[in-house]
Image (cartoon, grey):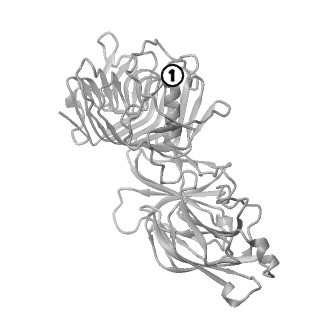
Amino acid sequence: MKKAIYALAAMAALTLASCSSEDAVTAPTGDGTVTFTAELPAMASRAFADGTTAAKLAYYVYDAEATGDTKTVLFDGTADFDGLHATVQLALVTGKTYDIVFWADSYGDAADKPYTYDGATQTVTVSYGTAANDEARDAFYYTEKSLKVAGPVNKPVTLRRPFAQLNVGTSDLEAAKKAGMTLSETGLYIADMPNALNLYDGTVSGSAEARFTAAALPEGEDFPVEPAKYGYLTMNYILVGADKTTVDVHLTSDINASADRQDVAFTAVPVQRNHRTNIYGALLTNPAVFDVEINPDFEGSNDTEIWNGLSEEIEAVENVYSISKAAQLAYLSELSATNANALAGKKIVLTNDINLSGNDWTPIKSFSPENIVTLDGQGHTISGINAPLFATLCGNISNLNFIDVNITKTIDFIGTAVGNLYGNLENIHVEGANIQPNGSMFTVKRVGTVVGIYNSGNATNVTVNAATVKGYYCTGGIFGTINETPNRTFTNCSITASTISGGAYKGALVADVNVSGIRFVSCTYENCEPQVAVADYDPSNVTFE
């Protein structure tokens, strides 16, 4: 069910005094301890690729400041997955900058594994020639680039498949049997495929014959297109680049028929990284007629759905909203527009990147201090937002990235994540933001890249890079204003390569702390830059105008 979003006539000013401290974010401990929580993308339906075959996570740590065409692995290691999650804890040197490469597959140290990693070139080489229809070949990767360690860090990351999944299905298995064609094994052949992947920059190279030898037909799997109609003939993973390309695919089999049935060719088949390509039709009795579709059907695909401004109804399961696309997130905005406490006590979990596409966004709101809202981005990214994600929030936000932010609306309190916040922040990153609201100091009162006015709660690992922020009264690089309440802690909060301008009060971390005219009395700042005065901040990182 899809509905048009109802626009709010105006944002209401907050009158709450405080919020509950339930579900508080726990700050990491230890100097230079970096903890990654790696997650594999899971499929919503059973059609291969559920991610559970990748049992072992390997990691390789590099000095990001080292030069040259080859790199030296400082140290490496492995971790086991518990379901779709694995935790890696690294003891790194404070003040140093690192690149960290992750690779996950099912083979571990097996001698006959089809994937080989070269640490010097950060490249995985793929060997073909194994049996077709093998789910064990599913694999995933992620690279953390230029991680500067300023203290303890907790960061969730989502690994992605470097492959396209190629599926072939037919609707005439029974008809073929009746015609005397008994098929029990299939294979796949593609003449020229890349066989090397640079995990640092994501590029593919090399050339190899991708030949998957004949193996038994897949059993117990649902074909991705009309599973009740089409039976699986073959499924294979092939290494491809990030951009769409075409390949000529040959299906081989042991079918008892004339020679021309031994090798059915499908020409100019589109394939793309982290996408499924499905070839289907009556392929055994009428192989000349078939359909091909390509879709980003892998959960957590790098390609996100482009939002058309409408909402799509979604129900909470055990008080959890699992959001995979922008229209579902917009539905939560619609709910809160009609009832400010509709989301009270709920948890929102992003299962995919969200692209709001620059369409008019109405901020979500939740005013209940007793039943807070929690949002776990699971390391996903929201892009193309043009207003705060939340107008007012009693709750916590964690593990969320923002890119392509462009906020020019006249709103009382402005921040990419929240205009008016009572709660905790953990692992929030904003990359590339233009925040220059129209209006005056009477209509635009608090402006920050992440939060406009921050009333209570702690912040850990909140970073901003490449932001342009302009306000009229209290303009902060990360927070516009912090209302001081007892025992608040801000850890690993930083801003780089940004410009901040405005009228009264501006600062790198925060423009102003309200406590009877006294600034920075009881708040604790660890590995932050909490300057209010313009001259105190490194001009190479932040420019004030």
Rendering quarter of residue 484: top left
Total labels drawn:
1
Q: Which of 321/333 is in front?
A: 333
* Residue at x-position 60% and y-position 76%: 128
Q: Is residue 491 above or below residue 110?
A: above
**Residue 419 appears at what percent x and percent y?**
39, 26
* Residue at x-position 34% and y-position 33%: 449
Classify residue 13 as left or right of residue 222: left
**Residue 83 appears at what percent x and percent y?**
68, 49
Q: Which of 378/3 is in front?
A: 3
Q: Is residue 211 visible?
A: no
Q: Is residue 367 above or below residue 164?
A: above
Q: Is residue 108 visible?
A: yes
- Quadrant in the picture for the C terminus: top left
* Residue at x-position 41% and y-position 62%: 201
Classify residue 477 as left or right of residue 167: left
Q: Which residue is mark 1?
A: 338
Q: Residues within 10 Å of mark 1 (few under 14, many from 20)?
A: few
* Residue at x-position 70% and y-position 64%: 230
Rendering quarter of residue 385: top left
Secondary structure category for the residue under label 1: helix
**Residue 320 appears at what percent x and percent y?**
62, 33
- Quadrant in the picture for the N terminus: top right
Give the residue furthest to the left: 545
Disc 1 residue type?
Answer: Thr
Q: Which of 214/84 is in front?
A: 214
Give the residue furthest to the bottom: 259
